[in-house]
Image: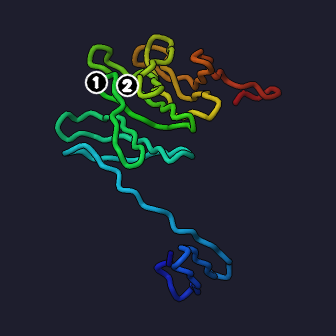
Amino acid sequence: FFSSRRRHTRSLCDWSSDVCSSDLYGLQTVSVAQTVTYLPSPPNSWTYAVDVNNNGVAIGYSYSMSTFRPQGLSWTNGEMSLLEGYDGTFASAINDEGVVVGFGFSDELGYEVPVQWVDGVAEELPTLGFGGSAHDINNLGEVVGVVRNSEGGGVEPAVWRNGELTLLATLEIGRAHV
């Protein structure tokens, strides 16, 4: 609740309701205490939570110090679940329906592919044949990310609606290209 610069902060806190009102540099602020939930992680790994939906389901990934691969994870009520389907996975976003997006890769493919996990089951999103990754998803189920346009080549911004890939080509605004 408190800034490390206490000389500039005057606070009045009601600890019974976990609400704190303060005057910070002349600005009125109100803070509400949040519950901190411990999120377990796989053994011998670095683990990061990267997103949480409005239902309290968190997603992220761990980086194994023994396999040197990322593993996508989700946490519901503090219980950890692995996002499987590939040799390595990475989770980047979750919507309120619980659909998780990110990427998966396998030694056989040799590159990353955009993936969404619906009810914990991996579904590969279409690409141009050279891989890509999914970065975010909204509550309509629209996914944004990138796809590779050639082997080892550049990437194109993309959106997937109902599982169909649309490239977000260079936008033309008047005569200027963005």
Q: Amino acid at mark 1?
A: Asp
Instruction: Give the image location of residue 116, x and y in percent.
Output: 47, 25
Which residue position holds label 1? 87
Nearer to the camera, 176 or 121? 121
Q: Amino acid at mark 2?
A: Gly
Nearer to the camera, 37 or 116? 37
Q: Tell which residue pokes out farthest to the top in this image.
A: 129
Q: Earlier in the sequence, mark 1 or mark 2?
A: 1
The quadrant holding residue 137 is top right
For the C terminus, the image quarter is: top right
Question: Dot 1: what SS?
Answer: loop
Q: Which mark is residue 104?
A: 2
Question: Dot 2: what SS?
Answer: strand
Q: Residues within 10 Å of mark 2 (few under 14, many from 20)?
A: many
Total number of numbered labels? 2
The residue sitting at 34% across, 27% down in the picture is 84
Q: Residues within 10 Å of mark 1 (few under 14, many from 20)?
A: few
Q: Tell which residue pokes out farthest to the left in this image.
A: 66
Instruction: Give the image location of residue 131, x and y in percent.
Output: 43, 18
The residue sitting at 59% across, 21% down in the picture is 160
Q: Is residue 14 above or below residue 115?
A: below
Q: Is residue 41 above or below residue 67?
A: below
Instruction: Give the image location of residue 93, x and y in percent.
Output: 50, 38
Q: Tell which residue pokes out farthest to the front in this image.
A: 16
Q: Tell which residue pokes out farthest to the right in this image.
A: 174
Q: Is residue 155 above or below residue 70?
A: above
Side of 4 relative to 156 (left or right): left
Q: Confirm or deny contact between disc 1 and disc 2 (CB under 8 A).
A: yes
Instruction: Give the image location of residue 90, x and y in percent.
Output: 38, 33
Could you give the CA–CA distance between mark 1 and mark 2, rounded to whole angstroms? Answer: 7 Å
Side of 81 relative to 42 (left or right): right
Q: What colouring does the structure picture have?
A: rainbow
